[in-house]
Every structure is written in C-alpha cells, then in structure tokens.
Image (cartoon, rainbow, N blue to C red):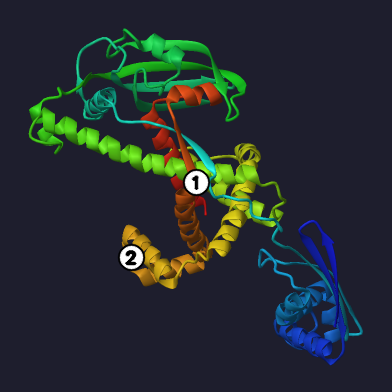
Amino acid sequence: MNVAVEEKGLLRTLTIEDEGQEIKDLVNSVLKEVSKNVSLPGFRKGHVPPSIIKAKYKDAINEEVAKKYINKHLPEILKEKDLAPVSPNLDLGEIKIENDSKLSFKVRFEVAPEFELKDYEGLEIEMIKYEVSDEDVEKAIQRLLEENAKYETEDKAIEEGDLVKLHYKITDEKGNTEEDEIEAIIGANQLRKEIEDELKGKKVGDKIHLENVPLYNEKGEEFGKATVDIEVLEVKKKIVPEFNDEFVKELGLGENLEEAKKKIKEDLEKQVKEAKEAELKQKILDKLAEQYDFEVPTSLVQAELEVLLQNYMRQLEQFGVKPNQDMLMAAAQGLEATAIKNVKLAFILNKIADKEGIEVTDEELNQEIEKMAQEYQISPQQMKQIIEEQGALAGIKYNLLRDKVLDLLKEKVKIVEMTKEEYEAKYGKVEGQPLEETKEVEEKQEETNEQK
C-alpha cells in the first residue's frame, strides 16, 4: 500500500494505491453482493454475468470497493501519518480499479487547527454593577397586575388596550380573497397601524373599508395592494386588578402587601444573580473568541450552521410562520459568523480542558441523561436510546465539558464592575432595563446550549 498526503490549509487529501490478492477478493465480494439483487432482461435474478454487471454498475462497484478498503485500513493509515479527521464523514473520489487487482483513490477530510493557548488567568471581564431597586419592584408589580388582567365585554367605543374580535376580508389586486375572524389587542402591535387608527372609536357592528393597503413579503418588500373590509364583532375592556392583600394571597405571594413586596424583591434578586451568572459566562466566551484568529474546519461550520438554522426554523414555527427558501438563505448568511465563532470556541474550550485536566465522567453524563429523561417523562434508557439514534451524545458531553471549563474560568478571570454610566461612556448606550438585559443574556445562553 502506498499513501501520499497533500496538505492545503486544514484539508488533507490522501492518495491511496494498492494492488494484489486483497483487491481481487474485495472486487469479487462486492460483485457477489451486487449480483444478488440485479435483474436484467434476458437473465434470471442473480445469474447476470459478472462482465455485464461490471460494465453497467462500474462506478457503484468501484465506490463500494473503496469504502470497504478504507473502512478496514483507515485506522492504521491515520496512525502512521499522525492524522485525525474532525468529522467521520470522508470524501472519496477519483476511484480507479485496473484488472480487478489494482485500486487507487483519494480520501479528503479536514483536521483540527493548530494554535497556542493564550493566557486566560486574570482575563478582564467588564460587568455593569446592578442591584434591585424599589423602582424595579414597582415595575414587577405592574407586570403582575397586567399579566392577571381580565377582559370583560362592554358596549363601548374601541380604545387603546381593548381586546377586539373582528371579521375581516382581504382582496388583492387579482381578486383573490382571504376571509376569517381574529382577536387582537389594540396598541399591542398585533394589527397594522392604519387598521388600528380606523378601528379606534368604532363599536360592535361598525364596519371599516380601506383601499390600497400595501402587501409585504417576508423580506419586507411591497409586492402589491389590497382592499380590507373589517366588521367589529366584539369589544372587551381590560380590567386590571388592584394590588391588595386579596390579590397577593391569590398568587401565593404572602399574607399582605409587605410580605409580597419582600418576596417579589427576593425573586428579582435571584433572577439578577442567575442572569448575571449567564452574562458572565457569555462575556468570557466573547472575550476568548476575540483573542484568537485561526482557520476552522468548514465541515464543522456547516454542521453548526445547520443546527442554528433548525433552531431558527423552530422559533418561527412557534409563531405560526413557515419559513421559505429565501428566508432560510438570508438567515444562513446572518448566522454564518455565529457558526464560525461557536466552532472556534469549541476548539479553545477543549484545549483549555486538556490543559487543566477537565473531563466529563460517565457518571456525570448519565446524570444529565437522567435529568433530560425526567423533563420528557420517559425512562433514562429510552432517553439514551433517542440520544444515540440522533447522534447527539457527543453534543451533550461537550455541553457538560463546556460548563465545567467556564466554571473554572469564572474563578480565574478578573471581574471589573462598572456603573451603567461608566459602561455606556466606554461602549455606548445600553438599551433596555438592567433586569431585561440580563434576562436576554440568560435566554441567549440557553439557546446556545440547545444548539450544541
């Protein structure tokens, strides 16, 4: 056997040549397998002459011979050449078989990038210092009241905050119509502004008629006009409860307002602590990614991109949106940088784990599978079978390793706390409220975990 290795970036191309009895045996073995299922006019099934089978199915036979050969010899070739593919998916090509005894072909795969770990001891992570204020408690109370508001039918004119039931009919320029009933809250961006403006002040039984209403596709591009006819079927007024002892008892917040406010503040402080923990992890990851600039395997980037796109599709489908090809192509372009970053971080974190001797034990992996089984209300054995069938075991193990590395890095980094004003003076305005910001970071962290 002769093996030549060609290097181009992270791509390795092996040119393999071999001849002799082993190749003859492989060719005969594949021919026998193929002939069992071949049926051609003028011949009984399984009795087609080998010469005809080889002529008709030459490419398929050559590929199968090369696959059987590489499955047997690849481990020894990789060991001899000190190579380790990053993916089990190999690209076979340029397969040639001469005289049923001489085989030559190419195998292509990518290897891991080589890079030196940078010092992560004392890595500076800037965080906004934040404590729960009385204002935060009051906002949380208002959210609770809004969440527990009820809607009651009234004979009234439509105004902001009302829940309305409408019958609509949309007619486009070609005469195509769509007709149905919907419920929407006025002022909640559930209806087009021009429609809301026309509805305000109307009562049950009133009708509105709008012409030349622009129609937009998924990219936000106008593609036509429509006529919209709407009839008001029902109007419900929003009734917000009072924040009193009776209300807090119903929600299990305490026996009185003082107890409720204390519990609300404690809950907010817990949310802030958890969210800041997630924010710290994300900032460590961001800082690590900024430190390195090395090539990553395109095969892994593509696999990661597919995972990100699947998550994107699931999110859209939760809102009743079925993404089309244009939407997916646009999303893929936007997510490519994230995919590259995630793959880069995987190599960095794995290298840190090797240096620090961090591993995921079988016990830890089984505990995680048991936890997942409880969430899905199935047995751990069933959960493990599903995970293995989906090929997700390595991803779960990586998530556990990732968390253990981040727990170590949290102890090694230097956290620099800043006021919101100091942070904004250095990096620009921070949008939203601190509690909302940290909650968004927490959700981003959970989404990243799911992607793995």
Q: Which label is found at residue 378?
A: 2
Whichever of callouts 2 and 1 sits on the residue coming sooner in the sequence is 2
Number of numbered markers: 2
Q: Which label is found at residue 277?
A: none
Image height check: is 51 above or below 444?
Answer: below
Quarter of the image where one finds residue 26: bottom right
Q: Is residue 220 left or right of residue 42?
A: left
Tag 2's secondary structure?
loop
Quarter of the image where one finds residue 182: top left
Asked whether the viewer can see residue 428, the reply is no
Q: Which label is found at residue 413?
A: 1
Q: What's the residue type where badge 1 is placed? A: Val
Question: Rounded to the nearest whole Å, what is the CA distance between mark 2 and mark 1?
Answer: 40 Å
Q: Position of residue 387 (x, y in %)?
A: 46, 65
Q: Is residue 416 left or right of residue 50?
A: left
Report the residue at 80% width, 83% height from top. 42
Q: Nearer the viewer, mark 2 or mark 1?
A: 1
Q: Position of residue 13 (x, y in %)?
A: 82, 66
User: Mark 1 and mark 2 in contact (Cβ < 8 Å)?
Assistant: no
> Circle 2: is it few (<14), some (14-19), or many (20+) Cα within 10 Å?
few
Q: Nearer the viewer, residue 333 or 100?
A: 333
Q: Nearer the viewer, residue 88 or 207?
A: 88
Q: Position of residue 382 (x, y in %)?
A: 39, 69
Q: What's the residue type where badge 2 is placed? A: Ile
Asked whether the viewer can see residue 70, the reply is yes
> Circle 1: is it few (<14), some (14-19), or many (20+) Cα within 10 Å?
some
Report the residue at 56% width, 42% height from top. 286
Image height check: is 177 above or below 346?
Answer: above
